[in-house]
Image: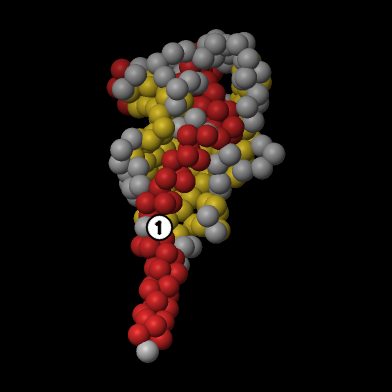
Amino acid sequence: MAASSKKPVFLVVILVVVLGIPAALWLARGVIATSIARDELDRRGLVCDERFSLEVSALFDEATIGPTRCTRAEGIVEAIELLEPVTVQLDGVSPESVAASSVRLTLRDRDVRGGESWARELSRLRLEQRVAGLIKGLSELSAMSLPPTTVGQVEVIRAGERIATAEQMVLRPGASLGADARRISFVAGPGGVGRLELTAVTGQATRPRVHLEGRASASAGIGPLSVTRSGTFAIDATALDTASPRFNLDARL
């Protein structure tokens, strides 16, 4: 009798252990997902600060990333900072899409070789390096194997100064990274005396080449003394993965 009475107890222990493992995994899903995500980001050359964490939904179909700053050891892109929580749609354990409201992209304080004196229209406004820096940054982002990503606003910083703002930016992975934006605004000079606004922007980015096109409005001066010109534009940057990239602007302003 003693041996038979122990069997139900033993079976209960086995059931608790077997059922407890998936339960423990479910409860620790955020910790596990955070660890996996850190490894994936590290593989892409991004190291995030101690705030980085994933909160995974009970159905494992969505995750939320809190504000964090991720840095890169090399390249023109120094850091990508999530200023507000980001929503990630999941397909199993893989990110299916990313939606962010506010992101800060920090560029290293160094000029892009070949990024000066490549367009008279930008030279007048002293904006060549600012545009070149963003283009070089797009070429580096194309190598990070990003999932489809939508960002409400991207703030581009260099040497502590905001040099550009992009609104409603969409990145689409593929053989080349598709890059669209409703508006990209650049400013230069004291009080933003030089301004360039690109709208309805579409383009493609790979590590060696970036092409952007759309409409442009350039202005210089302040108040009644300012001069504004607008029209279409196309920017082609090549050899971005070499020490001597080349930039070309075709603008009908």
Q: Position of residue 41 (x, y in %)?
A: 48, 38
Q: Position of residue 197 (x, y in %)?
A: 47, 32
How packed is label 1: few (under 14 Cα within 10 Å), some, or many (20 or more)? some
Task: Read off the residue under disc 1.
Answer: 29
Q: Which residue is drawn at 62% across and 32% down?
A: 205
166 with respect to 208 (left or right): left
Which residue, as the protein is rendered here, is positioned at the far bottom?
Answer: 1
Q: Which residue is drawn at 53% across and 51% down?
A: 95
Image quadrant where one finds the N terminus = bottom left
Image quadrant where one finds the C terminus = top right
Q: In which quarter of the image is residue 108?
A: top left
Name the residue type under label 1.
Arg
The colouring scheme, among rainbow, by chain, secondary structure or one colour, is: secondary structure
Q: Residue at x 41, y 61 (%)?
A: 25
Q: In which quarter of the image is residue 16?
A: bottom left
Q: Position of residue 139 (x, y in %)?
A: 58, 28
Q: Position of residue 35 (x, y in %)?
A: 42, 45
169 with respect to 104 (left or right): right
At mark 1, the secondary structure is helix
Q: Nearer the viewer, residue 194 or 97?
A: 97
Q: Which residue is drawn at 62% across and 19% down?
A: 241
Q: Is residue 41 visible?
A: yes
Q: Nearer the viewer, residue 225 or 204?
A: 204
Number of numbered discs visible in the structure rendering: 1
Q: Nearer the viewer, residue 205 or 231?
A: 205
Is 129 above or below relative to 205? above
Is 236 above or below relative to 32? above
Q: In which quarter of the image is residue 6?
A: bottom left
Q: Is residue 64 visible?
A: no
